[in-house]
Image (spheres, rainbow, N blue to C red):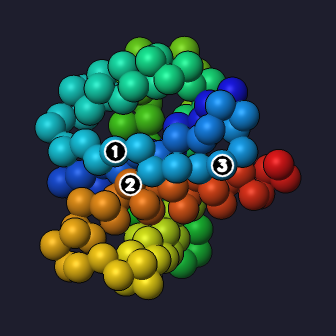
Amino acid sequence: MRILAIDPGDKRIGLAITDPTGTIATPLQVLLHVSREQDAQTIKELATRNQVVLVVIGVALDEDGGDTPSSRKARRLGDTLASILDVKIIYEDEAGSTREARETALTAGFRQRERKGHLDQMAAAILLQRYLDKVDR
């Protein structure tokens, strides 16, 4: 039972996936944003190849828990993905995941240029692990 997490951004989309038991999140890869439709198609192919049963999409909510322009964009990606992929899609607040990924990379000794692409997939892994921890695995 694999779960895929998506950390959508304006330029890059971070992806993370669980192990086959659905308990441990691991960074998967970073996609360069092309268009919503093309991004969704690429994600669909990855999800199908990895037998994903659930997709968690990070949304950046405002301080009151409301949608922001970024979260509306993420939801549109989710809607497009839902129209071509037959798996459940849920949305999770991604608050602090990029900051936490940056801190993790700094602690691990990554140089600035090494951190740039890795932060997106690390943020997706953090988002996914938070979700897994919340659903009491």
Q: Amino acid at mark 1?
A: Gln
Q: In percent of the image, x 44 and y 84: which residue is there?
A: 107
The quarter of the image holding the N terminus is top right
Corner quadrant of residue 21: top right
Give the x, y percent position of residue 16.
Answer: 47, 46
Q: Is residue 70 visible?
A: no
Residue at the front extreme of this rendering: 109
> Quick one: SS at disc 2?
helix
Q: In percent of the image, x 55 and y 58: which residue is there?
A: 127
Give the x, y percent position of residue 11.
Answer: 18, 54
* Residues marked 3 and 2 touching at CB (< 8 Å): no
Q: In percent of the image, x 62 and y 38: which residue is there?
A: 19
**Is residue 55 placed above or below 29 in the rendered structure?**
above
**Is residue 66 placed above or below 38 in the rendered structure?**
below
Residue carrying label 3 = 24
Give the x, y percent position of residue 18.
Answer: 60, 41
Nearest to N terminus: mark 1 or mark 2:
1
Locate residue 45 relative to residue 65 in the image: left or right.
left
For disc 2, the neighbor class at 10 Å (few under 14, some 14 to 19, many from 20) is: many
Nearest to N terminus: mark 3 or mark 2:
3
Q: Amino acid at mark 3?
A: Ile
Residues under labels 3 and 2: Cα distance? 14 Å
**Is residue 137 placed above or below 80 in the rendered structure?**
below
> Quick one: SS at disc 3?
loop
Residue carrying label 2 = 121
Residue carrying label 1 = 29
Q: Amino acid at mark 2?
A: Gln
Total label count? 3
